[in-house]
Amino acid sequence: MNSQVSPTPNKRIYIQEVVTRDGFQAEKDFIPTTEKIALIDRLSEAGYSKIEVTSFTSPKAIPMLADAEAVMQGINRVPGVEYTVLIPNLRGAERAIAVGVDEFNLVMSVSEAHNQANLKMGREDSFKALSSVIELAHSSKTAVNISLSTSFGCPMSGFTPLAELMHWIERFAEKGIRGITICDTTGMANPTQVQQVCEMAQAKHPNLQWTLHFHNTRGMGLANALAAINSGIDRFDASLGGLGGCPYAPGATGNICTEELVHMLDLMGLNTHMKIDTLLECSSDLQKIVGRTLPSQLLMAGKVDRTYTAPCQI
Ligand code: COA
Ligand code: ZN
């Protein structure tokens, strides 16, 4: 893999929306189920390959997503879009099977400290529990993705060694899963580190579906996405308006912003299949839903083709 070349023009890049899961999970004021459903239905027409609808977590841990069943059952599932959900344990998987989902997105952390904070157990216990969920997924013919949180760094224990990340990738890869998402939970990754991780992960497991999940906590999000594309990655999680963040990761802030990612990739001649104007309309309306300005710079500035009348000469 030559990391010095620019991305191939017209290369397909798959965009996966996470706003109604990662975006909503830390919001304080409950967003009504009908508003969640209406947003997902609009997003389903925007060109995504996957939408992470909700999470089947404990309602005590994530009260905002306590309506997971109602949301999954209320949305209009558009052919060609995969509807995935975050699942922390067997109980969550059983709830998801009862309503029918296209994929289980199982979560655990590479760092012991974040796994304890987020899932209230050690990594070995999580691995054992998730192994049972994978068996259940196989028997119900549901695709499995593993999201590895704190893959690059952890706000409690610092930099994540590459060997530790590869250790957990190897253990899950042996379980016959479809894909792995490498998550930068609190925006600690840099482009050089991203390139190294992406190249090693793909070289070891070329047949896994790889997704990169970045947060823009330190302004490195889009640079990291570009480093990943230059390393051969073609699939990204992103959140409308840049909303997001794990409530159990101190200092967490929003994901990379979907409309900013799509706008940049489209300008570069990559093929996202996305409708940027629909994204901007949805993002603008999302500000009304959450009641505040979102960190989307594109929403503030407009697309690059926005023009102004010349300022008056005094
Ligand atoms: N769905 C619904 N309820 C669940 C559940 C699930 N998937 N898993 C556990 N519960 C319920 C239990 O029934 C129990 O309820 P009760 O108190 O009424 O008896 C309660 O939650 C506690 O169960 P327990 O097994 O002791 O779990 P816990 O308190 O150790 O929490 C997790 C463990 C993983 C379930 C919880 O921490 C969680 O859902 N975390 C999600 C974190 C997350 O989504 N973070 C952001 C994304 S990275
Ligand atoms: Zn995230």
Image: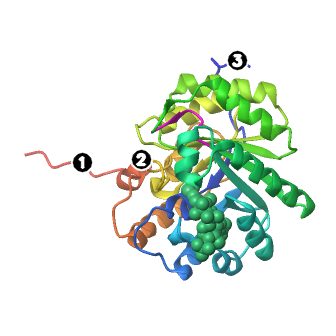
Report the amino acid beneath label 1: Ala
Which of pointers 1 and 2 indicates the residue nearer the eye? Answer: 2
The one nearer the camera, 314 or 96, is: 96
What percent of the width, then of the height, locates residue 30? 45, 75
The residue indicated by pointer 1 is 310
Decide: few, some or many residues near mark 3? Use Cα within 10 Å; few <14, some 14-19, many ≥20.
Answer: few
Q: Which residue is drawn at 56% across and 24% down?
A: 193
Q: Which mark is residue 25?
A: none
Query: Does label 1 or label 3 sit earlier along the sequence?
Result: 3
Question: Which residues are the magenta region?
Answer: 149-155
Query: Does label 1 or label 2 sit earlier along the sequence?
Result: 2
Q: In this view, does 307 lie to the left or right of 188?
A: left
The residue indicated by pointer 3 is 2
Decide: few, some or many residues near mark 1? Use Cα within 10 Å; few <14, some 14-19, many ≥20.
Answer: few
Q: How many labels does the image show?
A: 3
The residue indicated by pointer 2 is 250
